[in-house]
Amino acid sequence: MADYTPDSEFELDEPPSKSARKRQMHALQAMGESLVELNDRQLANIPIEDERLLTAIRECRDIRSHSARKRHLQFIGKLMRNIDPEPIDDALQQLHSARQRSTEAFHQLEQLRTDILAAGQEGVELAMARFPSADRQHLRQLVLQHGREVRSNKPPAASRKLFAYLKELQSVQGDPD
């Protein structure tokens, strides 16, 4: 009589369970939905060789009916089962990280503007430390204008101008990191 060992039963190469296949299909469908949300320029940077998939993605953008869009996203998920999703996923991750870096840079500029305006005339030195090529006189004028606007309860036009100037300086100088 042969000895039964439970480990020998699991050594067989079994196909994935129905739940695992379903999770994989939902992940592909979610990836397809991410592709649909991209604009044409971003989509051109994604390595998709399947022309049917590209056509389906472009068609899905024009569908306004919720149920029809859902069916079309399922179709995109079905088409994605026939291709290797790794390069597409990597490209989407790179796009997402670039977007995240851009958002972080935007928030850093907003914080710098807030710090400059809160410090008043001493805030000009904060900007000069970050952007040595900045026009000190222009910064000083914007800070003074902001002070006048706050005292007279006017809209923050100087604050907006300061942010635009800081953004321009950052684009000229590039990232400090």
Image: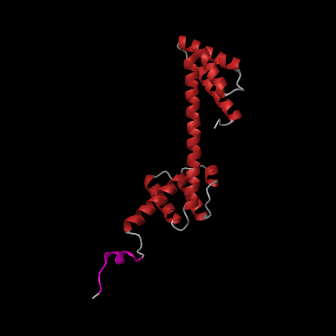
| Residue 125 appearing in the image | yes
Please, is residue 147 above or below residue 53 in the view?
above
Question: Can you give x and y, in whole percent of width and height, for residue 113 in the image?
Answer: 58, 25
Return the residue nearer the eye: 13 or 75. 13
Q: How is the image coloured?
A: secondary structure
Return the residue nearer the eye: 173 or 160. 173
| Residue 155 appearing in the image | no
Segment colored magenta: 2-12
Quarter where residue 132 is shown: top right
Residue found 71% across the figure and 33% down from its top: 172
- 4 in magenta: yes
The quarter of the image holding the C terminus is top right
- 126 in magenta: no
Residue found 62% across the figure and 23% down from its top: 126
Quarter where residue 4 is shown: bottom left
Question: Can you give x and y, in whole percent of width and height, for residue 75 in the image?
Answer: 49, 63
Residue found 55% across the figure and 48% down from its top: 96
The quarter of the image holding the N terminus is bottom left
Return the residue nearer the eye: 1 or 164. 1
Question: Can you give x and y, in whole percent of width and height, for residue 99 in the image?
Answer: 57, 43
Question: Can you give x and y, in whole percent of width and height, for residue 44 in the image?
Answer: 64, 54
Please, is residue 68 above or below residue 14 in the view?
above
